[in-house]
Image (tube, grey):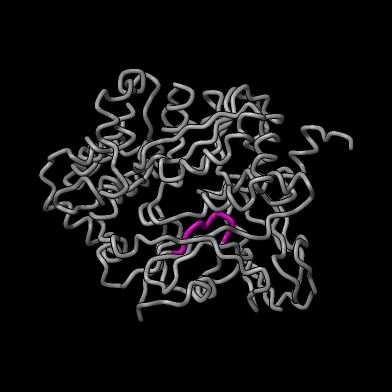
Amino acid sequence: MQKKSKQDLLRLIREAGVIGAGGAGFPTYKKLDATVEHVIANGAECEPLLQKDRESMLQRQDAFFRGLQILRDLTDAATVTVAVKKKNQDVVESFQPDLESNGFESLVYPDVYPAGDEYILVYEISGRLIPPGGIPLHVGCVVDNVETIVNVALAAEGKPVVDKFVTVCGAVAEPLTTVVPIGVSIADCLELAGGLTVDDPLILTGGIMMGGVTTDLSMPVGKNMGGIIALPRDHYLAKRKTQSQETYTRIGHGQCDQCSLCTELCPRYIMGYPIEPHRVMRTLLMTGEAKQRSSLWAQYCCECNVCSMIACPEMLDPKNICVDAKQVLRENELGRTEQELEVLFRDPHPARKGREIPIPTLITRLGLASYNRKAPFVSFDHWQPQRVTIPLNSHIGAPAKPVVSVGDTVQCGDVIATVDEQQLGCPAHASLDGQVTAVKANSIEITV
């Protein structure tokens, strides 16, 4: 069989709709159109309770290693490293023959949060610090989630992204990890896990620390949603994550005593970046130019939530204050100058390792001990939902535009929305056979 050219492979990856499966949803074809020294497969599964990365490697091991080979070939990388946390050390141990035969390496990182931060993985593996506000490509690295790498291998065979590994856990009868069609509802996923064990749940989408929140059980699973975590509405985390901007701002204005623990435990601060949440908290007492200038200390916040959920002894919300401060910077087109960064960007803190947050500590502090249960892989090969709603905007870049109409009959894998070749983005595909029953600007509904 004739070997595909780099451009042919990148085209196939784009046409298959491959995006980052573990985060913001950056289109993978764009990331891989580069020459780098290091390819890093991110299987750290940073968020507690989730097991979808573990299972995507185990259940599709052959595709995972084919994907790693493709990434190496596309980028001419000298080193390919599979990064996991200690909780999944057994996975890389079972992979050892394949790792050795391909010349791949592995990194087993302690069970700490946020070990999956690509800034941390790049530093641990390459010894290089990504520039403030930069990306791994700036230091000769590509970092991709392990499920994304599986999808790259399938794309090279002409198979589009039509399903998603997801962990369903929390207040459910039987926590599990499974594969579901893209666009299936959260409600359907909860039923697969035996149903809810609470009457009025709040759903965390993606993860307990950085994930979103919803009460809408009809919300569809997108290509980058890795977790569905149900919690009682009166749970500590549910209350914290639904607090209004007016409330957390008012409380922070009156209660912050500038202890600076939020800064001392900030993962990006201890990596040497100019992010100091306690200084951002001071902006609650400021207006005008002073507020704008002090907001610069929020510019490189990665929104990991350590400051709010772990560090602050007053249970204030520095993370959201930083998010609001970054909005101030965008509105006023402000940012650090190169001269400022030369002074403020430092080497990693010598006590960095001692300030990482152990996952057991995180689970205990956040009241999740009763939900810290195994979520084993369960296959539902013969199950399908009656309806899916395919999101068209789950990736960074231009949303996909529908190319089907209500009443059209589609088959699983058919292209139902596209993005112009000159724009950053990926097409969307039908995830089951059925009829198009609704077409909206940001979604397409298909009913069996």
Determine which quarter of the picture holds residue 131. top left
Which residue is at a point 61% across and 46% down the rendered structure image?
148
Q: Is residue 8 left or right of residue 168?
A: right
Which residue is at a point 47% across and 59% down the rendered structure image?
227
Q: Position of residue 91 (x, y in %)?
A: 52, 43
Residue 144, placed above or below residue 234: above
* Highlighted range, magenta: 222-228
Q: Position of residue 47 (x, y in %)?
A: 40, 50
Residue 311, placed above or below residue 228: above
Residue 227 within the magenta-colored segment of the rendering: yes
The answer to whether residue 442 is seen in the rendering is no
Determine which quarter of the picture holds residue 372. bottom left
Question: What secondary structure is the stretch in magenta mostly built from?
Answer: loop
Quadrant of the rendering where the N terminus is positioned: top right
Number of numbered discs present? 0
Q: Residue furthest bottom?
A: 199
Q: Is residue 266 left or right of residue 54?
A: left
Residue 29 within the magenta-colored segment of the rendering: no
Q: Nearer the viewer, residue 277 or 83?
A: 83
Determine which quarter of the picture holds residue 242. bottom left
Q: Position of residue 338 (x, y in %)?
A: 40, 21
Q: Position of residue 111 (x, y in %)?
A: 36, 42
Q: Nearer the viewer, residue 276 or 209?
A: 209
Quadrant of the rendering where the C terminus is positioned: bottom right
